[in-house]
Amino acid sequence: MVNLYRDTGVVLRTHKLGEADRIVTLLTRRHGKVRAVAKGVRRTSSRFGARLEPFGHVDVQFYTGRTLDVITQVETVDAFALPLVADYQRYTAASAIAETADRLSAEEGEPVLKLYLLVCGALRSLAAGERDASLVLDAFFLRAMSYAGWAPALTECARCGLPGPHTAFSVAAGGSMCQDCRVPGCVHPAPEVLDLLTALLHGEWPLAESTPQGTRRDASGLVAAHLQWHLERQLRSLPLVERRARETVLTSGASPRAGGSATRTPEGQGVPGQ
């Protein structure tokens, strides 16, 4: 009996296999992360090669193989990829989202519905282009960390739980820290930075979108540092996001340091964009 199953998923990444095939990594609704072989998709005659590019939201039929499953049918659900690859800022943000989702879904075949919905929501928002890409990305990071149990403490002390606001923040300690608990190496973000992070975590978009660029950059620095501390490795896609952010600042004529002192450091609730 042929063992077939279907699921919807988002293509996180692909890599070549042999002369004409690819191994495709998808985050699916019901089966979590799935790595499967797409045979012949690198040939120009392939029926569904273009549908299996990164960021594609697809309905897929799989055949269960001995080591890797095999993709036998693909239908497009949402054409996220086209608008994302056409805009460099949105493309780099989408790349960081896909890489983060890949890292957070370490076990293949384990359902991660909440993460799947977060990824779909973030990519949908980026593809629509209605919100700033950096805000969508940071909202995704915060909510993905909340899903993983790593959400930074923003309104209370990360160590003792004392209600804030607090002026110190430690990535290693888990977020905001009160005067009694603060540790060496704390940074001191402006209150507006923590307000922005709270707004992004909870989907308060009018507040987030009214925040100055300097505050957004400082918030992005804390978010990236916190995420990569817990991932225990740097995201390869983040330097591209940072470079694009610097280019945007320079072309807009704004000061790269306006509004704050922190920069993005190499190191849920709702759906981003909603």
Image (cartoon, grey):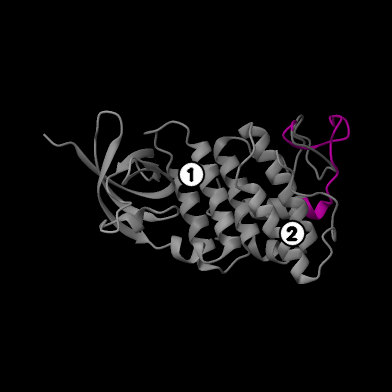
On the image, the x and y values in percent for residue 123 come to 50, 57
In the picture, measured across the screen, residue 14 lies left or right of residue 244, that is left
Q: Is 6 rendered above or below residue 133? A: above
Quarter of the rendering occupied by the N terminus: top left
User: Which numbered circle lies on residue 226?
Assistant: none
Front in this rendered view, residue 174 or 7 = 7
Q: Is 236 rendered above or below residue 271? A: above
Q: Is 235 rendered above or below residue 215? A: above
Mark 1 is on which residue type?
Answer: Leu
Secondary structure beneath label 1: helix
Residue holding disc 2? 246
Q: Answer with mark 2 or mark 1, whichever residue precedes in sequence.
A: 1
For image coordinates 60% across by 66% down, the residue present is: 131
Q: Is residue 266 rendered magenta in the image?
A: no
Residues at badges 2 and 1 in contact (C-beta under 8 Å)? no
Q: Which residues are magenta?
A: 172-193
Front in this rendered view, residue 65 or 138 = 65
Crowd rating for badge 2 (residues with CA inside 10 Å; few <14, some 14–19, many 20+): some
Secondary structure beneath label 2: helix
Q: Is residue 31 visible?
A: no
In the picture, measured across the screen, residue 271 lies left or right of residue 265, that is left
Q: Main secondary structure of the magenta part?
A: loop
On the image, the x and y values in percent for residue 99 come to 53, 44
Question: How far is mark 2 from mark 1, CA to CA?
Answer: 29 Å
Q: Is residue 18 visible?
A: yes
For image coordinates 85% across by 33% down, the residue present is: 185
For image coordinates 74% across by 57% down, the residue present is: 216
User: Which numbered circle lies on residue 115?
Assistant: 1
Front in this rendered view, residue 15 or 244 = 15
On the image, the x and y values in percent for residue 25 come to 40, 42
Nearest to viewer (mark 2 / mark 1): 2
